[in-house]
Image (cartoon, grey):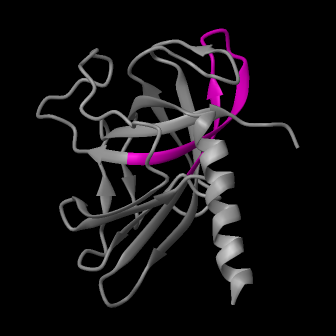
Amino acid sequence: MNAPSAGVKTVTRAARREAAQMISAEAALEHSLDARKDSQGNQFEAQLKEAVHLKNGPELANGTTLIGTVTTDRTKAHGASRLALRFTEARLKDGKTIPIQATIMDVSQPESGFDIDAGTESASVWSGKTLQVDEIGVLSGVDLHSRIGAKNSGVFVSKKNDNMKLLAGTRLTLAIAAKKAG
């Protein structure tokens, strides 16, 4: 009985160590993501809304493009959908890319007339203490599940809507770090 408990503590310590290397960043989706149209393997991009200096890597300037991949796209016949996303790299202004790891800690809809190039105040900041998010109704009819140290940056689930969309300009609060080699 002690072994599972010890394993849970090890995972939590590992997640805390990983979280200690991460910082908060705000990004906005450049294009909409649609559970019906975007399939596994499709790439997507988000743009940083502020400059951030990674604790274990370079500074990422305001406007740096974060590149990710749709890792799971399941639309069920009974009206539910699931969209798992994974951020994998940042494309710097000079065109170079660096591998990153990022966890989606919060999401908010784009404001009416939202301009993804406009510099606006951060709606939410990750404190460095939250290691897991299970937010029901983070967007209308959509839940967010994410965990520091998980393969995916976040998983969006809708049990009511088989046509789940994340609109262009959707704001993402991220815990982000340069990815360790190996």
Farthest residue in the top direction?
A: 94
Magenta highlight on residue 93: yes
The foreground one among 97 and 130 is 130
Say which quadrant the N terminus sits in.
bottom right
Confirm whether residue 62 shows in the render. Answer: yes
Magenta highlight on residue 116: no
- Residue drawn 41% across the image and 17% down it: 50
The foreground one among 69 and 99 is 99
**Residue 12 versus residue 61 in the image, above or below:** below
Which percent across, then down, holds residue 57? 70, 21
- Residue drawn 27% across the image and 16% down it: 118
**Residue 96 versus residue 171 in the image, above or below:** above
Residue 143 sits in quarter: bottom left
Residue 67 sits in quarter: top right
Which percent across, then down, holds residue 142? 27, 65
Say which quadrant the C terminus sits in.
top right
**What predominant SS class does the magenta segment belong to?**
strand
Residue 27 sits in quarter: top left
The foreground one among 95 and 181 is 181
Which percent across, then down, holds residue 69? 59, 50
- Residue drawn 45% across the image and 38% down it: 174
Viewed as shown, does residue 34 lie left or right of 123?
right
Farthest residue in the left direction?
A: 112
Q: How many marks?
A: 0
**Residue 141 versus residue 61 in the image, above or below:** below
Which percent across, then down, holds residue 164? 31, 65
Confirm whether residue 38 shows in the render. Answer: no
Farthest residue in the right direction?
A: 182
Which region shows up in magenta? 86-105
- Residue drawn 21% across the image and 68% down it: 141
